[in-house]
Image: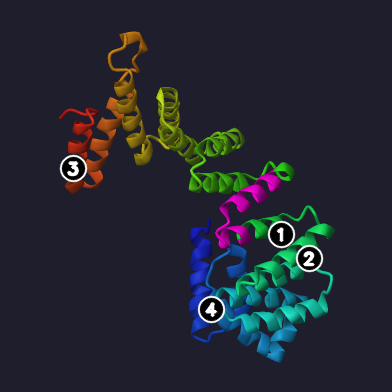
Amino acid sequence: MVGVAEEAELSRLESQVENGGGNVWEYLCLVKKLKVRCSEKVLRHGMALLKDAKGRSKLGGEVWTLYEQVSIAAMDCRHLEIAKEYIQILLKKFPDSIRVGRLEGMWFEAKGSWTQADKVYSGLLEEHPLDQQIHKRKVAMAKAQGNLSGAVDLLNKYLEIFMADNDAWRELADLYISLQMYKQAAFCFEELILAQPSNPFFHLSYAEVLYTLGGLENFKLAKKYYAVTIDLSGGRNTRALYGVCLCGVAINQLTKGRSREEKEGSELHTLAAASLVKDYKQRSVDKAPLVISVLEQMKAFSS
């Protein structure tokens, strides 16, 4: 995340650069460092700096980093000829660079030449089988073509090698959800919870997948993970509070007519409902009556 001080510095430099006040290189470096997506401005100011022979010479070896940054911005802005020109300059300077090779593959992607892009990436992987970025480019390419099953297969193969990559597990979970493969998505979130047990988002996502799967045991487990989410987020997670209420209602419906020992206690979802009502009355008074009405219909709250 971008810090307040860094955001202020970026805003200051951007204003200065936009008004012709200089410090273009400092601005572009900060944009790259903070991973801010402002491709049109990077393209415009970066090209101006590269066309200025005097300014370009001052960069020394860093000029090649600028060529890379502007190439990516040009692809973002669909100026593919500009991107191609700069990538060719980089290929001439660094013919065996895997970093430049990735750029070439990205250019074919941007052009929609999927076969050629895959050929570039496959060739690079033969020489550098452990390059994570190339593996991820192939996943991104499969997604871009709408081949979600192919993206799942590629990610599973990737995770066989890089099993500690939490971002990849989360991406795989999202893909499984898109394919309505909820049991597989649940497994991914289990891995993420093991890796980062204090992250409330993973507990919440796991609970939602369990609720979607349905069934008494899944509802009970989902309720527990919603409760953990509430605990980890200081009692302020609205989605988790609603989740507890929904699980409580579903459990009570499924256990209706059974002995009292088999029924799930209703205290937790009653407390969650009360917390929701209190929160809405404090932060969104006009919506509070609607929330109360919905919760009363669910028999999760009584005013």
Residue 234 shown left or right of residue 155 in the figure: left
Residue 79 found in image quarter: bottom right
Residue type for callout 4 = Lys
Looking at this view, is 238 or 187 the one in front? 187
Residue 284 shown left or right of residue 238 in the figure: left
Disc 3 marks a residue whose amino acid type is: Leu
Mark 3 vs mark 2: which is more N-terminal?
2
Asked whether residue 40 appears in the rendered view, the answer is yes
Viewer-side label of 4, 1: 1
Closer to the camera: disc 3 or disc 1?
A: 1
Pick the front one: 160 or 145: 145
Image point (30%, 27%), residue name: 249
Q: Which residue is mark 4?
A: 41
The answer to whether the residue labelled 2 contacts the one labelled 1, judged by CB atoms less than 8 Å apart, is yes
* Kind of residue indicated by mark 2: Ile
CA gap, disc 3 and disc 1:
50 Å
- Asked if disc 4 and disc 3 are in contact, CB closer than 8 Å, the reply is no
Q: Which mark is residue 240?
A: none
Please name the residue that numbered disc 1 is placed on. 134
Residue 23 visible, this orientation = no
**What residue did someone put label 3 on?**
290
Residue 124 lies in the magenta stretch: no
In what element is the residue under mark 2? Answer: helix
Residue 44, above or below 276? below
**Magenta-tinted stretch:** 141-159
Discs 4/3, front: 3
* Mark 2 to mark 4 CA distance (whole Å): 27 Å
Give the residue pinned by disc 2: 98
